[in-house]
Image: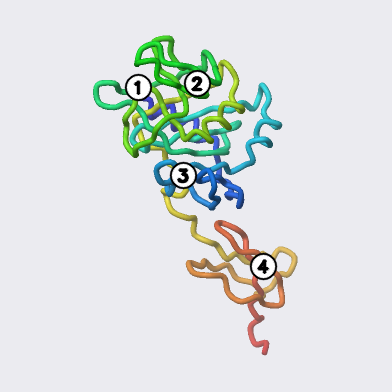
Amino acid sequence: MRSGALAVLLLASATILPAIPATAQVAASDTMQLAPDTLRNGQWAWYEEPQLIKASTNDWDPVSIVVSIPDQRAYVYRGGKLVGASTVSTGSDGHETPTGAFTILQKKVFHRSNLYSNAPMPYMQRLTWDGIALHAGRLPGYPASHGCIRFPAAFAKQLYALTELGGDVMVTDEPVITPERSGPATPLLMADARNLGGEAFNMVTMSGPAPRPQPATFVTGPAREIVQPIGRRGSK
C-alpha cells in the first residue's frame, strides 16, 4: 500500500519550515544553514538543538520520523514541526525497505545483524521483528542496504537519544513536499487606514523588494502586512 497520503497528513500540521540556526549540523566538523532539499549525501541538519528538542518532548508532543525513499532523506518532527533532517540509504533492489506506518519496537546502542554476517548496526531502532531497523551505517549516495534505513553516525546517535519505544516512523515511496519546494510566498504591501481615515493610505501589492522606509514604520517578509504612508491628494 502506498503511504504518500499518510505522509501528507503528518506533514500538514507543520506550518512553516523553521529558520535553521548557525549550529545546524551538516557534517561531523562543519556547520551551515541548509534546507532538507539541499542536503548532500552524508549531510544532516538540526533546526532546533537536539537537547532542547528532548527537553520539550512529552507524551502529547512526541518525536516522529518520516523517511522518503525517493528523496533518500529522513525528516524528524516534534508535534508536527520539522526539527531535523538527514540523508539516508534505504534498501537496494531485491531488499527494498517496506513502506507504511511503523513503531519503534526495540532500541540498542550497539547491535549486530542476525541475518547478514553479524554486521554492526550502531544505534539500532527496530521497526520490524524480521530485520528492518533504523541505524548508523554507510551512505554511498543511493539505496544500498538490505532493507534497513541507514543514517550518518553522528545523526543516528542524536536521533537515538530523542526517540522512545513506541515512537512513530512513517516510510513512504513518495517525495516529501516541504514549503521550499512550492516556492516562497509573495510579499504583500498593505496599508492600514483604520486609525487614519481619508485617502492617506491605499492598498497595493508588491512583487519585488520592499521600498525604502517612509515616515511610518513597516515590516517586510513573506505574506506580512506592511504599512507605508502615501501622501494626501494635493499635498506636497
Q: CB under 8 Å between callouts 3 and 1?
A: no
Instruction: For marks 3 and 4, give the one nearer the viewer.
Output: 3
Q: Amino acid at mark 3?
A: Pro
Q: Residue at x 46, y 24 (%)?
A: 134
Q: Is 82 on the left or on the right of 57, as rendered?
A: left
Q: Closer to the N terminus: mark 1 or mark 2?
A: 2
Q: Real-space Cα distance between discs 3 and 4? A: 31 Å
**Mark pair 3, 1: CA separation:** 23 Å
Q: Find disc 1 in the rendering and name its residue.
A: 147
- Quick one: label 4 or label 2, which is nearer the N terminus? 2
Under circle 2, the secondary element is strand
| Residue behind mark 4 | 218
Which element is circle 1 on? Answer: loop
Query: Tag 1 or tag 3, which sits nearer the N-term?
Result: 3
**Which mark, residue 1?**
none
Q: The residue under label 1 is which amino acid type?
A: Gly
Residue at the spot of label 2: 124
Residue type, numbered disc 2: Met
Q: Which residue has dot 3 on it?
A: 36
